[in-house]
Amino acid sequence: MTDIAAIDTRLSLIPTLRYTAASPEQTLADIQSLSDEDWQVSKQEHRNFGHSQRVIWFHTQIIKNHLLSTPIFLRVNYPHHDYIDLYLQHGEQNIGHFEGGDERTFASRPVDHRTFLAPVKIPMGEVVDVYLRIETQGPMMVPIELITQVEAVKDESVLLLFVGLYFGVIIIMLVYNAFIYTSLRDSTYLYYLMYMAAVAAQQFTLFGFGFQYLWKNPEILSNNFMIMLTSGLMETSAVLFVIKFIRLRRMRSRLDRFAGYSLLACCVSMLFSSFFMSFSTFISVVNIVGLVGVGCGLYIGVKGWLMGFKAARLFATAWLIYLMFIGWYLLDLMAVIDSTTYGNYAIAIGSVIELSLLSFAFADRMNQEKELRLHTQATLINVQRAMNEDLDQKVKQRTKALEEANRKLEYLSTTDGLTGLFNRRHFDQEYERLYKESIKNKQSLAVLMIDVDHFKRLNDEYGHVFGDRCLIRAGELIRQALNSPPDICARYGGEEFIVVLPNVKYNQAKQVAESLRHAFANTIVRDGRVAASMTVSIGLAFTMPTNINQHEVLLKDADNYLYQAKENGRNQVVETY
């Protein structure tokens, strides 16, 4: 029995508590009819009764032997129980019944407070039985105590000060890193901002402020769902941030990449499962995934540290500290260690330390990259100085090399990489030049449009490698048939080629076309054990150019004759004069 008059500021009821598990259907009358053997007594002062899918009833007795100058409240200082019912019994008379829990509307609580707080009015000198019924899917945390109104206000003021400092630090880091992101446009900072925002949202929910100020009606938006959603968002954004920060895709081993992306897949799956998974199952899974994720972050940080990545020192320290606080929180949550008020806030304390250290790690990485740039610039300056010192001796050598490079570049820019003929862009320039010269010199001009017959079938039957071999051989045959310069030939597109013959007679142009057709028909292309012949269809157009604006007409005519040759059965030349 607890004498309420013994209270100074607060008085824990845990040492005098008895508890028993019951079914949801059992009423207060059923509980009152239990014998003493049905009750268990707590043998040590702790606040955590583990996880239980059943209803737990708690019982104690209190008495008031002296008048008190301040109101007294009974407080269950944990904000996330689903259903709480408090009964005050004086003999057979019920002198008080109060409801709470985040599966009821917030308005049902006796006091507008983020935790369960109920006024206790005890008749002078009378014994009152206190029955507390708690049903929850989460941990059965029962920090039950009697507390004065002044002390309750003081406690909340201290908590609000802590919360204000916590979110103040978070907001400062958010603004600071948002400014850096807008300046650098580095997506790593964007993921870090997402992670910080998710951590802040999760802590806002875990402190109980979300249910107190935002989602007050569980029929519209459940507090349990918001805990699951913010937890899933936090862990998913954390893994995304770590993957980007350590450049997992480029700098890590195959095993690291597999582990990193597997963890990301787990977090994303867990995030979506928050919409349908039960709260008790989700909390068990999220705690395990969170512990594994932080352990991976620590491993990555230590590995980067050993590899000489300076920023990894703070990175590893941040995750190590966070891992310690998570371990503390989980041991508290599972009732392995005595539960304390600070244990409830372990995640918040660890997260703000971790986020601060990660910000410093960012700054360290920026400094390292700056040092690398400065070192690179200094190296370039030294190289430039060395080059200037022996410039007189090497100027001819470098000039020659530059000229050779320019020739190679010019060749590459004008040549088809596969066949060695001119490419389409260079051909267009050369063709217009030849056309103008033919007008100026009053000379003829012939165009041969050449297409390899059934080239798609060659590709499909023998493969693209053999098809490329056929195109290479086609380029060789065309080049051998011409007198270059002034004749020009080019790969016009795919398996199509074009030849321009300036200052030739019509019969000469036709002879070149027939010669080419025979050369193709009599050639066997071999590539290993694969061998095949190929034929071509040729369209020949001939003109005495007089107007530069007509140069496209000649090409179009040659193309039309080519299509006639293909329609007439292929392996032939179609021409007009």
Image (cartoon, rainbow, N blue to C red):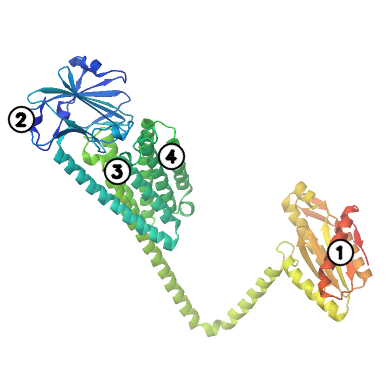
Q: Is residue 110 left or right of residue 552?
A: left
Distance CA(mark 2)–CA(mark 1): 116 Å
- Mark 1 nearby-residue class (10 Å; few <14, some 14–19, many ≥20): many
Return the residue at label 1: 557
Please give left or right for residue 414 compared with residue 81 in the image. right
Q: CA distance from mark 1 to mark 3?
A: 79 Å
Is residue 230 shown above or below 412?
Answer: above
Element marked by disc 2: loop
Q: Position of residue 204 (x, y in %)?
A: 32, 44
Instruction: State the residue at coordinates (25%, 37%).
Output: 112
Give coordinates of residue 160: x percent, y percent: 23, 46
Q: Secondary structure at mark 1?
A: helix
| Mark found first going from the N terminus, 2 or 1 | 2
In this view, the residue in front, 371 or 518, is 371
The numbered mark at residue 271 is 4
What's the residue type where badge 4 is placed? Leu
Image marks 2 and 3: residues in contact by CB distance under 8 Å: no
Which amino acid, by three-letter code, is at mark 2?
Answer: His
Q: Earlier in the sequence, mark 1 or mark 3?
A: 3
Mark 4 surroundings within 10 Å by alpha-carbon count, few (fewer than 14), some (14 through 19), many (20 or more) = many
Give the residue number, with chain letter if any, for mark 2.
66
| Disc 4/disc 3 C-alpha distance (Å) | 19 Å
User: Looking at the rendering, which quadrant does residue 245 occupy?
Assistant: bottom left
Foreground of the two, 188 or 10: 10
Does residue 283 lie above or below 481 as drawn? above
Q: CA distance from mark 1 to mark 4?
A: 65 Å
Between residue 267 and residue 128, name the one nearer to us.
Answer: 128
Q: Amino acid at mark 1?
A: Asp
Mark carried by residue 290 = none
Task: State the separation of the CA atoms marked 2 and 4.
Answer: 54 Å
* Residue type pointed to by label 3: Ile
